[in-house]
Image: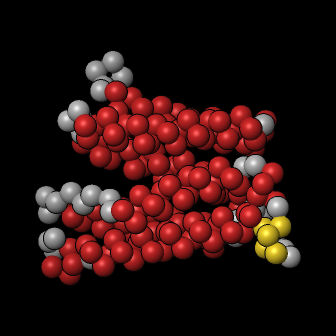
Amino acid sequence: MKNMNLPNKLTVLRMILVPVFMATLLLWNRWVALGVFIVASLTDFVDGKIARSQGLVTDFGKFMDPLADKLLVISAMVIFVEQGKMPSWVCMVVIARELAVSGLRMVAASHGTVMAAGWSGKIKTACTMIGLCVMMTPVADIAIAGSFTVNVFVWIVILVTTVVSGVEYFAKNGKVLVEGKI
């Protein structure tokens, strides 16, 4: 890790924080888990900003940064499924979208093209990270209307932004699967 640049070190830190987050949320204290999740989420924002602004984009970062993000988000969602706070099918839609987009990116990369994240993907990420934070608090259990809680509203927002960004991503880049190029 000594020879890694700062953005890559932040990505590695985020990966290390995933099991710490899971352990604290499952075994200890949701407020500490929330703090760990927020720190991990902020490293995602900071590492990308530094890498792009200082020309420190690396192949390691291109591969590991999105993987670290997916691990963080999926770990939280799997715990919420286990705790009954999120339906398993919502978690599966998110996982399927992430795998599909990753697969499309791999096909594009095999043709020498790097596909950047679009704005809808950035909005999806922000809504997901903020929403997962809300789900860790007592606010999530507040009823909005009947049994429709803040928690349900959050996973609906996560679901909608996930589907919309996935559809947009394939609409803009799906030709790589048909034509073998972008």
Q: Viewer-proximal residue, 31 or 108? A: 31
Q: What residue lies at 13% left-to-right and 58% top-to-bottom?
A: 112
Q: Can the viewer see residue 92?
A: no
Which quadrant would residue 10 be assigned to in this image? top left
Task: Relative to 34, say whether 2 is above or below.
Answer: above
Q: How many marks?
A: 0
Q: In this view, does 10 lie to the left or right of 40?
A: left
In the rendered image of this protein, does residue 102 appear above or below residue 34?
Answer: below
Q: In the visual, does 146 lie left or right of 104?
A: right
Residue 42 position in % (x across, y down): 49, 39
| The N terminus sits in image quarter | top left
Using the image as rendered, state which of residue 146 and residue 69 is in the foreground: 146
Residue most extreme to the front:
144
Quarter of the image for the C terminus: give it: bottom left
Compared across the picture, whether 49 is left or right of 132 comes to: left
Name, please, the residue furthest toward the bottom.
Answer: 178
Residue 133 relative to residue 171: left or right: right
Outermost right residue: 146
Query: In the rendering, at what x and y percent does residue 77 appear?
Result: 63, 57
Q: Would residue 122 be visible to someone looking at this image?
A: yes
Tell me the residue at 34%/71% (across/down).
169
Residue 108, image quadrant: bottom left
Q: Viewer-proximal residue, 87 or 125? A: 125
Q: Is residue 176 above or below residue 138?
A: below
Residue 146, quarter of picture: bottom right
> What's the coloring here?
secondary structure
* Residue 73 rendering spot, x and y as whole percentages: 55, 53
The percent position of residue 66, horizontal first and vertical second, equals 39, 50
Give me the residue at 48% from left, 31% from top.
13
Which residue is pictured at 32% across the width and 47% down the height? 63
